[in-house]
Structures are given as structure tokens and as C-alpha cells.
Image (spheres, grey):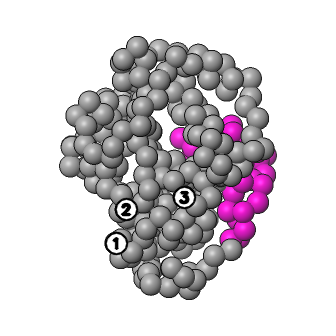
Amino acid sequence: MTRLNDLPLRRLQFYVTTQYACGYLPEQNARSLTAIPANLIDTQAYSELVNMGFRRSGNYTYRPHCDHCQACVPVRIKVDDFVPSRSQRRAQKHHGNLEAFMQPLVFNMEHFQLYAQYQKLRHAGGGMDNDDSEQYRSFLMQSQIDTVLMEFRENGVLRMVSVMDKLSDGLSAVYAFYDATVMGASYGTYNVLWLINFCRELGLPYLYLGYWIKESRKMAYKTEFKPIEGLIGDVWQPLLLE
């Protein structure tokens, strides 16, 4: 397990934030441990940080550091062991006509409009449903990591955008947004399945899915991809689900 004093992390500094309202558990306060300066966090350093449970939002790299709560569990899929369920196979077949196109990590108005629609329809009142173009740029277009943006089209129509970081041992799913007006779609499931296959194509063993919180319904989908590992007590191990 990489430690904070190992190279290239030795050049970084780590600070604990003040308390802020938790975005996942109601009436809970949270803190984060942040890594700075951002300009020193390249792909190699970030790969080690992700392995230690960190995640990024734009150029802000953090991990939960709450006073009396350890509900946030970093999770990852070991892609060679993953076998899709029947419903996941149906989702993959249902969206088999989607075409993936790699695009540069630059602002694209069509992408932003889909993002804005997705936030308003799927996450109304969540704090991101009023994001303007600058907030979108700061969140998804800023990166010093080896970041890939894939767009998915159906007969030329943009249906989904997925942003991921290429790490030394896997892919880290940054964010995905999709056309929330399509009834009966399973774009979120399809995105994770596509990322698993992309890991296999690249010869990367892990897909990192960020944090899982048992009490959060928003994050329940992550444990549908089995087997899944969690970082518990600084050790990656199979996540035991009741």
C-alpha cells in the first residue's frame, strides 16, 4: 500500500478542510483531506492517490476525512473477475447500437446542453442542476491527468458522455451524463459495462468507481457489479454485502 510519504507523493502537502454539509447523508457534516499543489498531481501521482482512496473534481483532489463517520468506501471492480448479470447483459444488448467516439477534453456546447438537461431531470435540487458553463468547465474540462472523454451516439444523436482517467493500474470513472428523456434506457449501466470492456482492451486490471455509501440510494448501483472490492482499513478487499 502506497503511503503519503512515498515518492512522488512526498512533494505534496495534505490539508484537512473545515466542516461542510455532507452531500450524501442528511444532517451530517463532512471533512475532506485535500492534496496540493494541483500542478504536481500528474497521472503517476494521481494513480497512487486513487489507490489510497482519493478522488478528484476538476483539479481538486480529496478523500473523505470525517470526524465520526467512515461511511464513504472507495470501490473498484477487478475486471478479469467480473461476469455481467442477466439484467446487465440485457442493458448491453439494448444499447448495442450506440457508437463511441473519443473527443478532446474541451468545452463542447452540445455536451454542456446534455449535461444541463441531465442535471435538471435526474438531480433537481442536488446543487448541480443550476451549473453554468464555467462550473461545467471547472468540474469536467480541467485535468492534469491522462483523461479521456467519450461521447456515445445513436444514429448520430448524442445520448451519453463519459469522462474517465487512465491510471497506471486501471480507469477511474470521473462522471457520466446522458439523455434522461429516453424512456426505458439503461445508459448508466451500459456506461459501467463499456468501461469494464475498455479496461480489458487496455490491459488494465481495475475500474475505480469512486465512493460507495451503504445508506445512499444514489450509490446502490455500484454494488450491482460483482465482485467488487472496497478500501477498508487501508487494504483493498472484497466488499461484503449483506
For image coordinates 49% across by 60% down, the residue present is 55
Q: Alpha-carbon distance for marks 3 and 1? A: 17 Å
The Cα atoms of the two marked residues, 3 and 2, are separated by 12 Å
> The residue under label 2 is which amino acid type?
Gln
Q: Is residue 107 visible?
A: yes
Label at residue 39? 1
Q: Secondary structure at mark 1?
A: helix
**According to the image, label 3 marks what residue?**
167
Occupied quadrant, residue 176: top left
Q: Residues within 10 Å of mark 2 (few under 14, many from 20)?
A: some
Against 70, residue 162 (above or below) is above
Q: Residues within 10 Å of mark 1 (few under 14, many from 20)?
A: few
Picture coordinates of residue 3, whole percent (x, y)? 61, 80
Which range is magenta? Answer: 213-242
Viewed as shown, does residue 189 lie left or right of 39?
right
Query: Is residue 14 placed above or below 94 in the rendered structure?
Result: below
Which residue is painted at 47% across and 47% down in the image?
A: 164
Confirm whether residue 212 shows in the render: no
| Residue 79 rendering spot, x and y as whole percentages | 70, 45
Q: Is residue 7 magenta?
A: no
At mark 3, the secondary structure is loop
Kind of residue at disc 1: Asn
Left or right, residue 152 beside residue 91: left
